[in-house]
């Protein structure tokens, strides 16, 4: 699932899970609160401008408004509580109004959506895509350029700005996935479904991705399996030996590339689900993505058990 697909999937349940799981902020995810829904607070306006600049000048990102973040023992900001926005319709209106005013040049493709908890109170979620039209300056009294690194925004140096102004179009690679159901076997307690998640890489940038490699680490009880054996489909990635590593390494041949907006399947995660099964463990994937002319991307992808169940179990059974 790429950043935009993740943005579209975010709902009240996922936001609540962010807090219960103490979700860490990362390269593409930021939690923010606001003092007033009308953006009358100067610091709120500056924070929004910095986030617009930082995400657009990097690999894009998502802001979840209404979630409190504090540093954990490792010094990484993580979700720890709620400070819901009210009135939410006014806040969404202000986000749309200031999006074109708080960054220069304007970033195309920014979206904002509301996630209502009750009445006109709840959360807002902002999607900021990566662009090749930068660098983008944060306005609202900031007048500086920013980039995203880890879980923070940092002020760009002169050489960063020079590099962006003269750079070639580059690839932006993100992990994507698809949950599929295979056959089923009937037993004394109902049907058992054979399932798998196909993991792939999608190129969100405007440059061709070359010499692509991917490292995947998987949470128990899940494991990676042979792609061709299960699906009968060809795959361009070759599995490599990785002595001393808990991750499986995949590499794309030098003569194969990923064009912009296209994706390639990489690996497969097989598992089984009983139709009466309620507790499905989340699939947690530690990811490193490497390619020519691209910084190594290190992130964590979580595929929620409830999402898996909703894709696999027929609706008529789900409603029973």
Image: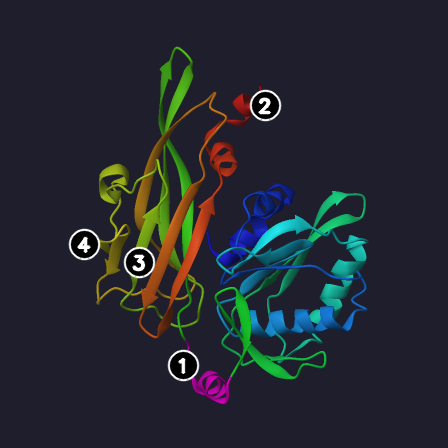
Identify the residue position indicated by label 3 in the image.
214
Span of residues in magenta: 157-169
Which residue is label 4 attached to? 243
Q: Which of marks 2 and 3 is in front?
A: 3
Q: Mark 1 points at which residue?
A: 168
Q: Neighbour class for label 4 at 10 Å: few (<14), some, many (≥20)?
A: few
Task: Tell us which disc is closer to us: 3 or 1.
Answer: 3
Q: Earlier in the sequence, mark 4 or mark 1?
A: 1
In terms of depth relative to the viewer, which is nearer, 109 or 134?
A: 134
Residue 81 in magenta stretch? no
Q: Dominant secondary structure of the magenta stretch?
A: helix
Q: Measure how far apart labels 3 and 1 are at the Cα level.
A: 23 Å
Instruction: Say which quarter of the image contains residue 13.
Output: top right
| Sequence-first tag of 3 and 1 | 1
Compute the Cα span from label 1 to label 2: 52 Å
Disc 2 to disc 3, C-alpha distance: 39 Å
Secondary element type, mark 2: loop
- The quadrant in which residue 51 appears is bottom right
How many numbered circles are shown? 4
The CA span between labels 2 and 4 is 47 Å
Where residue 242 appears, as percent x and y from the top left, is: 20, 55
């Amino acid at each position: 699932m790429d950043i935009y697909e993740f943005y579209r999937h975010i709902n009240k349940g996922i936001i609540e899970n962010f807090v219960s799981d103490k979700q860490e902020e990362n390269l593409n995810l930021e939690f923010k609160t606001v003092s007033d829904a009308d953006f009358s607070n100067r610091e709120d306006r500056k924070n929004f401008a910095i986030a617009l600049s930082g995400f657009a000048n990097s690999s894009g990102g998502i802001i979840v408004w209404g979630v409190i973040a504090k540093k954990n023992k490792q010094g990484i900001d993580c979700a720890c509580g709620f400070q819901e926005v009210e009135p939410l319709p006014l806040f969404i209106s202000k986000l749309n109004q200031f999006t074109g005013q708080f960054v220069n040049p304007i970033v195309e493709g920014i979206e904002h959506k509301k996630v209502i908890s009750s009445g006109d109170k709840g959360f807002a979620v902002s999607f900021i895509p990566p662009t090749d039209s930068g660098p983008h300056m944060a306005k609202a009294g900031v007048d500086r350029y920013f980039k995203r690194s880890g879980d923070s925004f940092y002020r760009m140096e002169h050489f960063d700005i020079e590099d962006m102004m003269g750079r070639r179009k580059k690839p932006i690679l993100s992990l994507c996935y698809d949950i599929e159901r295979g056959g089923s076997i009937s037993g004394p307690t109902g049907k058992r479904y054979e399932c798998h998640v196909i993991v792939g890489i999608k190129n969100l940038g405007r440059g061709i991705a070359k010499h692509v490699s991917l490292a995947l680490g998987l949470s128990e009880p899940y494991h990676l399996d042979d792609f061709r054996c299960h699906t009968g489909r060809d795959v361009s990635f070759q599995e490599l030996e990785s002595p001393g590593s808990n991750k499986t390494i995949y590499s794309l041949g030098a003569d194969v590339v990923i064009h912009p907006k296209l994706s390639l399947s990489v690996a497969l995660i097989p598992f089984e689900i009983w139709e009466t099964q309620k507790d499905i463990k989340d699939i947690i994937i530690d990811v490193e993505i490497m390619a020519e002319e691209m910084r190594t991307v290190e992130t964590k992808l979580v595929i929620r058990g409830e999402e898996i169940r909703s894709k696999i179990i027929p609706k008529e059974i789900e409603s029973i």
